[in-house]
Amino acid sequence: MCKIRIGVIAAICAVLCGAIALSAARPAPQASASLANDPKLVEDLVYANRILFAQSVLDGFGHVSVRSDKDPSHFLMSRSMAPGLVTSKDVMEYDSNGEPVDARGRNSYVERYIHAAIYRVRPDVKAVVHSHSPDIIPYGVTGTKLLPIYHVSAFLRLGVPVFDTHNEFGDTDMLIRDNKLGDGLAKVLGSSGVALIRGHGFVAVAESTPIVVYRAIYTQINARVQADAMKLGTIKVLTPGEAVKAQAIVEATVGRPWELWKSQVGKIE
Amino acid sequence: MCKIRIGVIAAICAVLCGAIALSAARPAPQASASLANDPKLVEDLVYANRILFAQSVLDGFGHVSVRSDKDPSHFLMSRSMAPGLVTSKDVMEYDSNGEPVDARGRNSYVERYIHAAIYRVRPDVKAVVHSHSPDIIPYGVTGTKLLPIYHVSAFLRLGVPVFDTHNEFGDTDMLIRDNKLGDGLAKVLGSSGVALIRGHGFVAVAESTPIVVYRAIYTQINARVQADAMKLGTIKVLTPGEAVKAQAIVEATVGRPWELWKSQVGKIE
Amino acid sequence: MCKIRIGVIAAICAVLCGAIALSAARPAPQASASLANDPKLVEDLVYANRILFAQSVLDGFGHVSVRSDKDPSHFLMSRSMAPGLVTSKDVMEYDSNGEPVDARGRNSYVERYIHAAIYRVRPDVKAVVHSHSPDIIPYGVTGTKLLPIYHVSAFLRLGVPVFDTHNEFGDTDMLIRDNKLGDGLAKVLGSSGVALIRGHGFVAVAESTPIVVYRAIYTQINARVQADAMKLGTIKVLTPGEAVKAQAIVEATVGRPWELWKSQVGKIE
Amino acid sequence: MCKIRIGVIAAICAVLCGAIALSAARPAPQASASLANDPKLVEDLVYANRILFAQSVLDGFGHVSVRSDKDPSHFLMSRSMAPGLVTSKDVMEYDSNGEPVDARGRNSYVERYIHAAIYRVRPDVKAVVHSHSPDIIPYGVTGTKLLPIYHVSAFLRLGVPVFDTHNEFGDTDMLIRDNKLGDGLAKVLGSSGVALIRGHGFVAVAESTPIVVYRAIYTQINARVQADAMKLGTIKVLTPGEAVKAQAIVEATVGRPWELWKSQVGKIE
């Protein structure tokens, strides 16, 4: 149980140390020449990458995207690289099919179709996180439903759906590597805020970058707390009524942890 | 199990790193113009915020207060912000109803009524912590009683009461957002040092700031140790007689860890 | 399980950060005027304090001692303070009854009788650690025997004895606060390297400072691994023959981790 | 569960802090005069040592080797020391029997025969890791098979074999201290990527240094996730078909975490 808060705390340190080391190790940042998007949108996307790495939701793998403000059928995401190293100049634009608008030789994440598929069918969604968080994996492979155990994870509502590629696609390489698989995932996600992928990880979606970061972090915390609580006895989770009300009030205060997380990551590029 | 000490240790690092980053990120501190309280009281309150964040008892949420030395019906607490970022100039004064004496546009924590209600009925209490510690959550939702497993958590005595808002108030947003809910919590707390809130977190109270910090930290550690021990067999907890005696001697030495925790947090503002 | 290595690793960071912060926060060190002991003995004692704090075996509480080279009936130990802050000038000399030879107003740990009692009856012991490690607590309160699960904890041999003060002394404050209690503990320890104290912690003893530090660290790791393994099935622990042989070879290489631990702590005072 | 990501994250911090401390504590590096190998091979070997220490796969014990590019029957490995302190000048050359080519008074790891035996019978193997990871120990002592729970640990395939020295060799000191024991381990390893050693640790092998580092890290993570998932219910692990396909694609992207891990370790010597 204890490990939960450790994650948060240890992460702070890691990011700060990371910030020092990384800034020493890499050349001065350059503006991403091809993007005409709101610089604030790009900045928050970079923060999201760094924060989620710091909070151990992402490691060397995983990715975050935001819907483009310039063309709402498009989205922005880093080139293929570790999220903890992403800078603004690594951000690329993708079209509604998940293809890069102007690749210029840069590699794309194989699983960009996760993002494309969700943006196509969820106009309310402005940001998407994909993570391999080990804390989440057990819920995707055992049939135990992830449920909201306390008010800060109220957005889990009536439980989190699971997408198992094996059901429809048989033996694959487990990656959401095309639009057909992406559509399968988006269908399972439905109108939820979070969906698990069996033997792989999860996606979180939200109407803003701070909220998607918040949901990804507290999905992971809820997973640990629920597993710990199951060992102690039968859990009284939030009632559906409590979940709706608690989600509204807690997500309205997301600016509070967001400012903390940004300050912990330090200056980004 | 191991995770317990890690929390403590990792926290040190986090705070120190945090101290560096935060001091770089924010303007020079200014004295809180409106407070005529003992500067030592305010300083210890700021330390309590930083220490409890460092020890992972608080994250982006949660809060700490101290009873005012100037007007014992009032209390001091930060404006609404992440505890890890609190400085002395963020400290505000609240009256016995939980309303700010001189808000000057600053936001207050929604759950300030937790503090107000407890100060109203517990004259012995000089400091209050409210936390969402994930280590504690399982005990509030499963009916498993939190009990003193070793001498440093002897203050848990005969076990920790649980306040479930659903019993009396039905589907709420889970927050202690008014004096009625605050009174309900204070009633359940009774004369205890700690009370849990189902699906939400816990409160710790004490006769001084160092002791409330100490109790919050070791309540969290006890929660982890007890959960770990339950997996190994039936636990022989402290007898009531042992708990009374151990609490007295251990709390008399709280200055030892308090000096450590302060040194780990470094210079505050 | 994972948490084990984290402890080790996180600790490194903590110590290093700690070293920076603490050296900034405190005045220049002064030689401990009254001690005529080998400076290397005192230096290693200070390292032991810092390393065990860094490795999360000690927190704000706990202590380490070494047998005096000048007068083998005496021992050296810090004045009463958090182990993570100990410097050479905090080291005091104690006689065979656990009383300070020259207190000069400095406070002593209440539980110094743990050390005195063991040095009295175990001439082979040159160093003693007393810890409240939460990882160890479950074994002292449930009757589950701590056993050597892998070669690096082979020194646990046929299992670790448990001293329960309640059996002989009834409701106490749980502290080993006099020579009678100390003798009770030393008797239970017998010729072992480690003994647990119910609802309190453990002691580790050894023929040198590096080895007692090593035993304390790997006792804690073994406790976590054993608890994790118990959840997976019946454990095949080291056979008595394996334990004897493995202990000899592993403890002969203690210099390897000792150099690492020292380098992690950095310069001490 | 949470602890998994913590390991990764906390490690970052540790390494960075470590890098600072260690560079301060030791003299300027010197080229390893006797080695005529590709400097990149030696550099990656040093990175492997530092990264695996940072990721908590290695502590004060354990070692990493690479097959020599100059003489493929030989291999390179550090002299006997803590992996977290290894520099290029500590790297020595060993022959096919595990004996140092030019010891010049430097000590060798007792268990160098692990590496020699595997290089003798596995021409595909270019790098070997030996670790005592506490996360892995439970699988070697309980009979619970380590299986691939998600796509990033697909290389575990149909499960990991266990070498129990007691079966063939009876009561030993548990070390793989000669070629006979090494051959026994290599035989159990067979064509696998990973093998466990009962009451001792594990070995990971691969066709390159980044991949062996990757496998060692995710073997440890898988061990934690699997243990956590077993508490929630029956696990649907990767099918054999999924494992083959997923391993191929994930190991093709190992450069992504490898760059991250290197950046976290900082400048090596």
Image (cartoon, coloured by chain):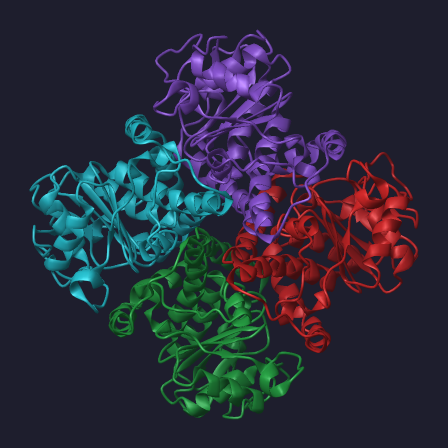
Chain colours: A red, B green, C cyan, D purple
Answer whether residue A15 is visible to the viewer in this image.
Answer: yes
> As displayed, is residue A231 above or below residue D91?
below
> How far from the left and from the top, in percent, is residue D203?
53, 26
Q: Nearer the viewer, residue C89 or C247?
A: C247
Would you say residue A67 is visible in this rendering? no
Is residue A123 or residue D103 the one in the foreground? A123
Q: Residue at x 83, y 55 (%)?
A: A188
Q: Quadrant of residue A254?
A: bottom right
- A196 vs D77, nearest the viewer: A196
Image vertical order of residue D167 relative to residue A30, above or below: above
Count up the numbered dots.
0
Dividing the picture into quadrants, the one containing residue C106 is bottom left
Between D167 and D30, the one lying in front of the other is D167
Q: In the image, residue B196 lies at what x, y percent?
A: 49, 75
Residue A206 screen position, x and y as percent: 78, 63
> Residue at horizontal 64%, vertical 28%?
D211
What residue do we see at 39% from left, 83% from top? B126
- The answer to whether residue D132 is left or right of residue C170 is right
Q: Position of residue A133 (x, y in %)?
A: 65, 49
Would residue A184 appear left or right of B230 to someone viewing this image? right
Residue at x 33%, y 69% (from the top left corner): B154
Relative to residue C154, is residue C203 depicted above or below?
A: below
Compared across the picture, whether B18 is left or right of A53 comes to left
